[in-house]
Amino acid sequence: MSNRAIVAQPHAGFIESEIAIPEPLPFDLIVRVEAVSLNPVDLKRHEGLTAATILGYDAVGIIRAVGARVTNFKPGERVFYAGTTTRPGSNQAYQAVDARLVAKAPEGFDVAEIAALPLVSLTAWELLFEKMGFVPEANANAGQSLLVINGAGGVGSVLTQLAAWSGLTVLATASPKNHQWLLNHGVSSAIDYHDDLVASVHAAGFDSVDGIAILYSPEPYSLAAGSLIKPFGHVGTIVGPTPNIDLSSIKAKAASLDFEYMFAKSDFDDRIATQGQILAQISQLVGHLNLQSPVTKVYEGLTLDNMTAAATLLEQGHQVGKIVITLPH
């Protein structure tokens, strides 16, 4: 039995390779991958590679084998996960992944729908509920408001839904052609990102908001964020700032600036089991129809052509939702 992988090359594209099926470490699962999804982190890691690497940080698949210390999963179960950047990724037919990063997949959904969920769901959940301090329970944050910059991307499409489920009133920016997408994903007020942000939020009936999630480069939004955030509120971002960012207006409100990086836990072996626990909650929300998958584009077959096409589409920077590649076995 072979393990076909799509391998990213330093300063080049991808190659197809046949590699050995991995053996499980004590906490590992060996998963026969059924679908994977692309994320901006794939592009960023590819740009910085110094050695050939199997990328891929979203997967759904069937457990083939379990490690000696795994007690909560068994072969034959369907699971989903984002994994870690410290080990070979999901762009292969069989992957080894730490079981603590994994949850059982929601039942009754297409594998393409499931594959689009893990990384963006973990990012959105950690930013909203671990970093920004909102309560991860249905309607627990009623009466509070959240502004989301770039609400139609992969993370935004899940974050807006989680925020609405938790009771937040959600405002979000996107291009006008994507405003219906926003409204279908938990947003109450859709804002044209071309327009003046402060004026648009005021026009929507809000003098200020309790939280702001910047899912794009934060520099163009820092002054507006400082103007709109309530005193002692939270401004969260998933993109690192440049040295030239002006944070003075955020500081003047004594607001917290929260950074979210989903791989920090596995990079530093810190509370990694919480990611499996979060995905278990995501699975329940999807199963109860409180959360819909952001998949918008599906390629059939983990091939060199499909990976190249998917990466090129993502690189264009205008992707709504998520891109998925399925692996027929």
Image: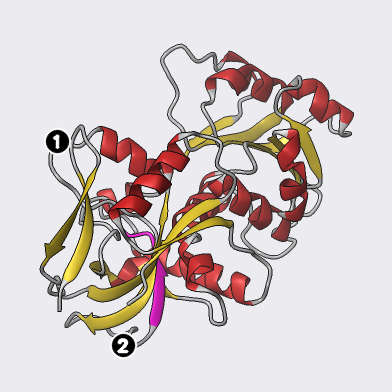
Observer-nearest of 154 and 74: 154
**Residue at x-position 77% and y-position 47%:** 180
Which SS class for mark 1?
loop
In the image, residue 63 above or below residue 294: below
Observer-nearest of 169 and 233: 169
Q: Is residue 82 magenta?
A: yes
Q: Does residue 141 appear in this view?
A: no
Observer-nearest of 88 and 12: 12
Q: Give the crowd class for mark 2: few <14, some 14-19, many >=20 residues within 10 Å.
A: some
Instruction: Find out whether the residues at labels 2 and 1 contact each other: C-beta distance under 8 Å.
Output: no
**Residue at x-position 50% and y-position 15%:** 245
Rendered location of residue 286, percent (x, y): 60, 71
Q: Quadrant of residue 289?
A: bottom right
Residue identified by numbered label 2? 74
In the image, residue 75 above or below residue 116: below
Q: Judge left or right: residue 26 versus residue 308.
A: left
Q: Is residue 268 magenta?
A: no
How many marks do you count on the picture?
2
Q: Quadrant of residue 295?
A: bottom right
Decide which of tag 2 and tag 1 comes sooner along the chain: 1
Spatial separation of the CA atoms under disc 2 and disc 1: 36 Å
Magenta-highlighted residues: 78-83
- Kindly identify the amino acid type of the residue bearing the numbered disc 2: Lys
The quadrant of the picture occupied by the N terminus is bottom left
Which one is closest to the eye, mark 2 or mark 1? 1
Q: Which mark is residue 226?
A: none
Residue identified by numbered label 1? 50
